[in-house]
Amino acid sequence: MTAHRHGRSAAGLLGLALVAAVSLQGCSSAGGAPAVRTVAVTIHYSHFSPARLGVAAGETVRFTITNSDPIDHEFILGDQSVQDREEAGTDRIHDGSIPGMVSAPAGTTVSTVVTFPPHPAQPSLTYACHLPGHYAYGMRGWLQIRS
């Protein structure tokens, strides 16, 4: 069952705020579809590994998140305003309908695909878990968008 923290309209705003937002333009492969690079992220002992990532402006990335912990987590990618809203919210499940926001139940691997804008408004973002106490514990990482 999926709960929406701020309702449908706010979920749309979160998506827009994510990366001004997620552009549908990306690097093209021979078939004209965006080329997708996969980046593996592991959650272990309530920490993300790697804790720092880099992507190219305009790149499409599939983040594959493996939660090896016996407790649930989430992967929320966005600027500080997104992190603040998520930390203050009550939704504990993200169904993946917003790029860069996905729940990672204990012992599972999930993914989310994000296309970064060719000219990002902010060159760095945070990825974090906002389940109760996790963000305060330091469960976050940083992503740099290279031009």
Image (cartoon, grey):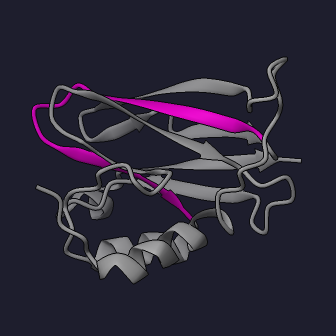
User: Horizontal placement of 2 versus 22: left or right?
Assistant: left
Q: Give the residue at x 18% y 38%.
A: 105
Q: Judge by depth and name the residue closer to the eye, 27 or 46.
A: 27
Taking the view exactly as shown, the residue that stands out farthest to the front is: 31
- Residue 37 image-quadrant placement: top right
- Residue 86 image-quadrant placement: bottom left
Residue 144, position in %: x, y? 71, 48
Is 45 placed above or below 22 here? above
Extent of the magenta region: 59-78
Residue 45, position in %: x, y? 23, 34
User: Horizontal placement of 7 versus 24: left or right?
Assistant: left
Q: Give the residue at x 54% y 72%.
A: 80
Q: Give the residue at x 29% y 61%.
A: 130
Q: Judge by depth and name the residue closer to the eye, 97 or 101.
A: 97
Give the quadrant of the N terminus: bottom left
| Count of residue discs | 0
User: Horizontal placement of 118 versus 87: left or right?
Assistant: right
Is 118 placed above or below 72 here? below
User: Horizontal placement of 103 versus 144: left or right?
Assistant: left
- Residue 69 image-quadrant placement: top left
Is 16 placed above or below 24 here? below
Taking the view exactly as shown, the residue that stands out farthest to the top is: 30
Residue 101, position in %: x, y? 41, 53
Q: Give the residue at x 86% y 59%.
A: 119
Q: Main secondary structure of the magenta part?
A: strand
Residue 18, position in %: x, y? 57, 65
Would residue 64 be counted in the magenta stretch?
yes
